[in-house]
């Protein structure tokens, strides 16, 4: 979203105005009272309390399948990016990407902390690139 927002400003507004904000308002007004009243701390727990264990199990299996597909897409995207940047074979890039993910998983909580730090610096560098690109293209002066 950030990249498309930097590229074409108007395309993210419909997502926020039509999708994200109304969904959050709907959840806050209509769904939170159900969760709060049932003392459930998560959606799967609420499904188990409201319906039964089979419904919660179906939700868990559906979520696991969606996670596998989503992870596969992310792994493919990382391998394509790595192949474009370093020029390696796609299969080697998939293996390297999978190794990076496995190391991240085995490091546990420590990796989440390092990931947050890495993301911070990548966001700062990305913002610097956008600002310097804007100055170069349109001659803006930010000082």
Image: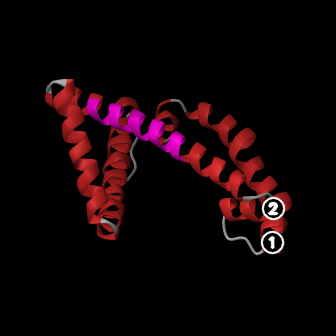
Relative horizontal placement of residue 140, taking residue 57 as reference (left or right):
left
| Residue 21 point in image, percent of width and height | 72, 49
Counting residues from the start of the chain, the first of labels 1 and 2 encountered is: 1
| Residue 97 point in image, percent of width and height | 24, 41
Q: Secondary structure at mark 2?
A: helix
- In percent of the image, x 85 and y 58: which residue is there? 30
What are the residue bounds of the magenta stretch? 64-79
Magenta stretch containing residue 65, yes or no?
yes
- In percent of the image, x 23 and y 48: which residue is there? 100
Image quadrant of residue 132? Answer: top left
Judging depth in this view, the residue of 141 and 100 nearest the camera is 100
Relative horizontal placement of residue 1, taking residue 51 as reference (left or right):
left
Magenta stretch containing residue 63, yes or no?
no
Badge 1 vs badge 2, beta-carbon distance below 8 Å: yes
Inter-mark Cα distance, 1 to 2: 8 Å
Circle 2 sits on which residue?
50
Circle 1 sits on which residue?
38
Dominant SS of magenta comes to: helix
Q: Is residue 45 shown above or below 72?
A: below
Image quadrant of residue 140? Answer: top left
Q: Is residue 40 shown above or below 4?
A: below
Q: Secondary structure at mark 1?
A: helix
- In percent of the image, x 14 and y 31: which residue is there? 86
């Amino acid at each position: 979203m950030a990249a498309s927002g930097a590229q074409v400003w108007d395309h993210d507004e419909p997502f926020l105005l039509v999708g994200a904000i109304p969904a959050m308002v709907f959840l806050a007004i209509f769904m939170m009272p159900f969760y709060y009243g049932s003392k459930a701390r998560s959606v799967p727990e609420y499904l188990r309390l409201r319906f039964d264990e089979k419904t919660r199990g179906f939700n868990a299996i559906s979520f696991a399948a969606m996670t596998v597909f989503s992870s596969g897409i992310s792994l493919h995207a990382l391998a394509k990016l790595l192949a474009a940047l370093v020029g390696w074979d796609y299969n080697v890039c998939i293996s390297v990407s999978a190794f990076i993910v496995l190391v991240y998983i085995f490091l546990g909580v420590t990796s989440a902390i390092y990931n947050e730090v890495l993301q911070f610096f990548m966001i700062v560098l990305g913002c610097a690139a956008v600002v310097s690109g804007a100055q170069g293209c349109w001659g803006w002066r930010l000082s």
